[in-house]
Image (spheres, rainbow, N blue to C red):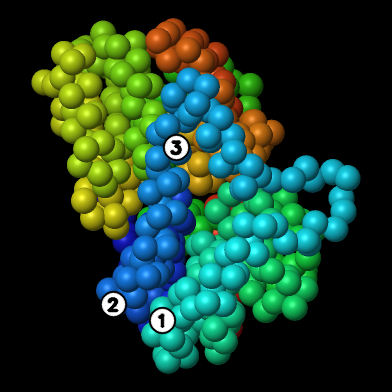
Amino acid sequence: MLNKTNQELSTNSKPKAWVLTVSMGYGHQRTAYPLKFLSPNQKVVNANNYEGMPPKDFRLWESSRKFYEFVSRFKKVPIIGEFLFYIFDKFQSIWTFYPKRDLSKPTISLKQNYLMIKKGWGRSLIKDLNHKNLPIVSTFFTPAFMAEEDKFDQEIFCVVCDTDIARTWAPLVPQKSLIKYFTPNQRTSERLMLYGVPEKNIFQTGYPLPKENIGEQMEIVKQDLKYRLLNLDPQGKYQENYSPLIKKYLGTLPEAPNHPLTITFAVGGAGAQLDIAVYLLESFKKELEKETIRFILSAGIKEEVKEKILKKISNAGLTEHLNKNIWLVFSKDINDYFCQFNEALRTTDILWTKPSELSFYTALGIPIVMAPIIGAQEEANRKWLSKIGSGIPQGNPKYAYQWLSDLINDGWFAEAAMQGFIEVEKMGTYNIEKIISKS
């Protein structure tokens, strides 16, 4: 069990802000989950699907969500699928950072976004929230734009959830906007300034990670990493070479791990990468049968994705290992799913995922095997993980056991784990809470 919940780790249970998100994939919702303790009744408001939502608003949001999921799945179709996704991705492309220049000119898609807002899109939501003297913290840019356009009378904050961002994240006229941004890294802070956002409106807080995985003094994340290093460095090569570094950041390591080597594979919200899970089950089948390794398969909240994973496990002849050394993380309730996932990370040694918002979870001291990307944001995240040394490109999943074992025995994954822990800000949630409390 986890040591403390988000609520128990909060310094004050009094509501401090409306926390808004959108249920389009898991990225923005996952970003909002660690901040839900700020919100009344610890409830995150889905701006694209809430009780009493006008049907017209719902249809606008729903068409965007369905199109995104369709394109994500269809991308795998040779030639046609790749071309369709290329066109779609062009609308969310991230311009080159160098040479540094004025990038404040709004894009066509941003202008269209504002046109719909001016016609009333989101007005009902902002009106409902505009009566409790609480600021807004949104993990998606559109609700923040809606709030400002409809004269929300408290402060408006927007949480950035990628390592680099497109122009659509900044307001139509950023120089005059009062929206404040919480950014995860230096690049996104500088990028927003190139887009015209005043420096005074940018707070480089770090990405909001779950308090239950960190601890108020980082006691939880440090303890988990100590055990993780033992699994990721069984030959002791990294420990021998970097003993002073380990002692400086973590102190003395335990004598033995508290869990078997554990790989967590995160299936995306659209379920587009299930084929990788099949190869992993086949590649590690002997080790799974001997129960010398543990697999955690994150199925999310969709019943059809869970059933597909169960079928893959059955086809691999590994059903008897379910709930022994093969675990599924699944719940129809999004909050329960995130709670289960965060608990699973406590004993995860390697996180295998496309470089989504989960890239920031390398701050927990978890090395990431980077699955093929989907979209410009994930390309930026992939480059960032590679730059800091905590992300390892996916090799051929058919032979995953071979190359993973070599990298583990050589201490590469242990080094990646420490790089993520050292290089990435871990206290984002706490930093955001302090700023909100002063607003």
Amino acid at circle 2: Gly
- What residue is at 28 percent from the left and 25 percent from the top? 294
Per the image, label 1 sits on a secondary structure element best described as: helix
Q: Is residue 225 visible?
A: no
Per the image, label 2 sits on a secondary structure element best described as: loop
Do the residues under discs 1 and 2 have CB atoms within 8 angstroms?
yes
Q: Which residue is mark 1?
A: 124
N-term-proximal mark, 1 vs 2: 2
Spatial CA distance of label 2 from label 3 is 30 Å
Q: Which residue is mark 2?
A: 52
Question: Alpha-carbon neighbours of circle 3 within 10 Å: few (<14), some, or many (≥20)?
Answer: many
Question: Alpha-carbon neighbours of circle 2 within 10 Å: few (<14), some, or many (≥20)?
Answer: few
Per the image, label 3 sits on a secondary structure element best described as: helix
Q: Relative to residue 434, is residue 68 drawn left or right?
A: left
Q: Relative to residue 349, is residue 180 drawn left or right?
A: right
- What residue is at 11 percent from the left and 21 percent from the top? 320
Furthest-left residue in view?
A: 320
Count of picture labels? 3
In terms of depth relative to the viewer, which is nearer, 365 or 136? 136
Amino acid at circle 1: Ser
Residue 301 position within the rendered picture, expressed as x and y whole percent measured from the top left: 26, 47
N-term-proximal mark, 1 vs 3: 3
Q: Which residue is mark 3?
A: 72
Q: Relative to residue 428, is residue 288 drawn left or right?
A: left
